[in-house]
Amino acid sequence: MASPVIIGSERSEAGLAQGMAILRQGGSALDAVEATLRLCEDNLADHYVGTGGLANARGEVELDASIMIGSTRAFAGVGAVKNYPNPISIARKVLELLPQHCLLVGEGAELFAHENGFAKAELSTPESLALFREALKPSENSVEGVRTLAAAGDEAYREKAIELVNRFLPHEGPWGTINVLALDEAGELVCGVSTSGYPWKYPGRVGDSALPGTGNYSDIRYGAAACTGRGELSMRALGARTVVDGLARGLDPTEACLEMLREASALPDAFRAELRTLCLTPDGRHGAAAGQATATYSVMTATSTEVEIHPRTQL
């Protein structure tokens, strides 16, 4: 039997202890990953997953999530889901009830959630709305008296809108997608991710978190990996799959993570932001890497008394 391990990205500690409790009781990695991420999605203090996630450019919260099983490489994801607070559970239900598909987005994902009894909820909270509105305040150097009349006015409006979008930044504190990877005593290896994506994103934008091989990948032969941060870079570099490929070639977990980040860092990107990754192997080894020296990830083993915070290796 394998010794259970569960790891997660920053802020996964909101649910990691529950996931390990499931594993200690002989539960499955699939159950542990879903339960952990549900608690993260329900954490109202976290504005990058689930309820309280920051809205898109229309002021609507859209959620992405996916889950993958290492032994079969079965995968299911959902993207741009509105009004349903636990996309990780919807993704799992797609995995189990709609195996002919791997990905549902937008209205289709919401229809599937409705058909399967998922409860609707308001995803914005007073705090998340306040954060959204704060960023919409005029900048100090905005030009007063610009009139949006006729063609010239329309152009001025578009220019100001572009300026506004270009200065949007995440709020202070840890942010981004949450990754959870679990190994159960039967040796199954499962990876899951959940996110509300970039704040103020273009409506309908789906990031790496809903896609296999980018935000999430698990192969029981070699390991599982997940990414957070600049999703478009992860999509272009096939981030999670590239990490697992490194494990398959014999790299240790940390070096496999660093190799992927090196490859992604070589890609031209006018909107470059940090990309982070972490991985877990079938024998319980784990590693993580990031572009910042202060980045961490969370770990629990069968003997852990509390969540252990480990430093990520800096690129």
Image (cartoon, rainbow, N blue to C red):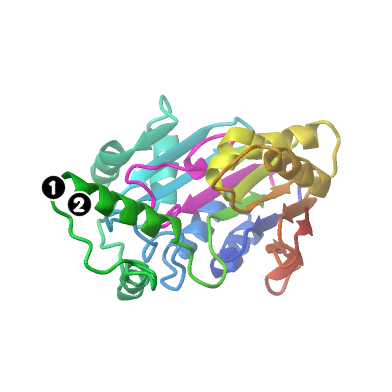
* Residues rendered magenta in the picture: 186-215
User: What amino acid is at disc 1?
Assistant: Ala
Image coordinates of residue 97 in percent, x first then y, are 38, 34
- Disc number for residue 150: 1
Whether 17 is drawn above or below 226: the answer is: below
Q: CB of mark 2 within 8 Å of CB of mark 1?
A: yes
Can residue 23 be seen by looking at this rendering?
Answer: yes
Whether 286 is drawn above or below 67: the answer is: below
Find numbered disc 1 in the image and state the secondary structure of the residue it sits on: helix
Query: 214 or 152: which is nearer to us?
Result: 152
Image coordinates of residue 165 in percent, x first then y, are 39, 56
User: What amino acid is at disc 2?
Assistant: Gly
Q: Is residue 139 magenta?
A: no
Whether 42 is drawn above or below 67: the answer is: below
Where residue 206 sits, quadrant-wise, is top left
Can residue 1 be seen by looking at this rendering?
Answer: no
Residue pointed to by mark 2: 153
Residue visible at 46% across and 53% down? 195
Residue visible at 75% across and 46% down? 257
Q: CA distance from mark 2 to mark 1?
A: 5 Å
Whether 222 is drawn above or below 37: the answer is: above
